[in-house]
Every structure is written in C-alpha cells, then in structure tokens.
Image (cartoon, rainbow, N blue to C red):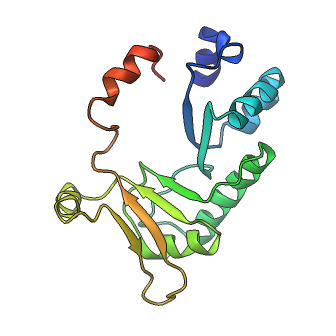
C-alpha cells in the first residue's frame, strides 16, 4: 500500500533518519504490513524508539465518537494498544483528529482505559471560534457523573493543518506527500 510505496521511494529513511519524521494515529495496517514485509519491522521499531515515528492514540481506527457502541470503542483502542505495546509504545493520548462529534461518554471510557489527554479537531466551526476567542481550546473535560474520570482535552484551531508558516518549512524538508 501507500506506506510501503513511501518506504520504497525513500528507502534511505532507514539509513539516514535525521530528516524523517512521521506520526501515525491508526494502527490497523501495521500487523499485516509486518507480516507481508517482516524486513521492515525492526527498522520501524528503531525509528519509533528514536522518535522519528510517533505512534499516538494507538486505536485501530478513529471511530465516530458521537454514535459509537462502547464495546466497539473499547475494543478499537485496546487492540490498537496491544499493537503499540509490541512496538514498546504505551500511549496515554487519545488522538481523534478526524472523528465526528465529541462525547462525554467517550472521554469517560478513555479516562477509564488510562488515557490522560484527548486531541480533537471535528467540532463545529462556530464552537471552535468561540472556544478560541475565549482561550478555551485546551480544557479539562469534566465528567458530571463520574467526577474522577476527567480528561484534559485540546481542540485543534484548524482541521487538517499545523501552525501557520510551518507548512512551508515542512514542504522544504519533506517533499513526499502521503
């Protein structure tokens, strides 16, 4: 798939890692990828260890938070975390930049599973602008029913973007687009 193509086109990432940086938030493809290409597993693990590859969230996917079955959500993250643990990663950050909606039930479940933080981007533009004006893009999502199950939450100010000006710098050092 695309990950293998990226590695083949830039095979030297395993030799000279100084320029390479990647963040993965969904883990579903990794077991099959390593089964098909076992020669990439150790270099991949080494790049995770050195910080060239960050594994965040460690879910199998980024489920819709507003209409999810709790058992499905728990299995999604627990199975993904098993994959991450095989790679010596124990994340405590929920990473849902493309999940629709937000839910106090999901934040409670993530808190119960040991997550300390949650990053979101899919909230309405109106709410996002209001939160930004009020300086509340980062907040402690308090569970009204289970007061010990709060979750520090960050809402991205834009949807699929990084800080202003950073795109040009990233384009200059990483010409490959995934």
Which quadrant does the N terminus fall into? top right
Task: Specify the quadrant of the image occupied by residue 77.
Answer: bottom right
Give x and y (percent) for residue 70.
57, 71
**Figure disc tally:** 0
Residue drawn at the location 48% of the way across and 24% of the way down: 178
Give x and y (percent) for residue 90.
70, 54
Task: Specify the quadrant of the image occupied by residue 39.
Answer: top right
Give x and y (percent) for residue 86.
80, 46
> Is 5 situated above or below 83?
above
Q: Which of 63 and 125 is in front in this view?
A: 125
Residue drawn at the location 27% of the way across and 65% of the way down: 136
Q: Which of 81 and 136 is in front in this view?
A: 136
Residue drawn at the location 24% of the way across and 63% of the way down: 135
Residue 92 as seen in the image, left or right of residue 140: right
Residue 131 as seen in the image, left or right of residue 172: left
Residue drawn at the location 78% of the way across and 30% of the way down: 34
Q: Nearer the viewer, residue 79 or 120?
A: 120
Give x and y (percent) for residue 173.
45, 16
């Amino acid at each position: 798939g695309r990950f293998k193509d990226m590695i083949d086109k830039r095979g030297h990432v395993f030799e000279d890692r100084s320029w390479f940086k990647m963040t993965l938030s969904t883990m579903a493809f990794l077991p099959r990828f390593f089964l098909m290409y076992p020669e990439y597993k150790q270099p991949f693990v080494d790049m995770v260890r050195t910080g060239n590859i960050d594994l965040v969230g460690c879910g199998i996917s980024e489920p819709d938070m507003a209409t999810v079955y709790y058992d499905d959500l728990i299995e999604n993250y627990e199975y993904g975390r098993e994959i991450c643990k095989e790679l010596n990663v124990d994340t405590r950050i929920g990473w849902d930049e493309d999940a629709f909606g937000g839910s106090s039930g999901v934040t409670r479940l993530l808190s119960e599973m040991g997550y300390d933080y949650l990053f979101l981007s899919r909230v309405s533009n109106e709410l996002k602008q209001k939160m930004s004006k009020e300086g509340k893009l980062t907040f402690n999502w308090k569970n009204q029913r289970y007061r010990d199950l709060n979750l520090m939450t960050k809402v991205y100010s834009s949807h699929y973007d990084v800080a202003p000006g950073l795109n040009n710098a990233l384009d200059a050092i990483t010409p490959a687009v995934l």
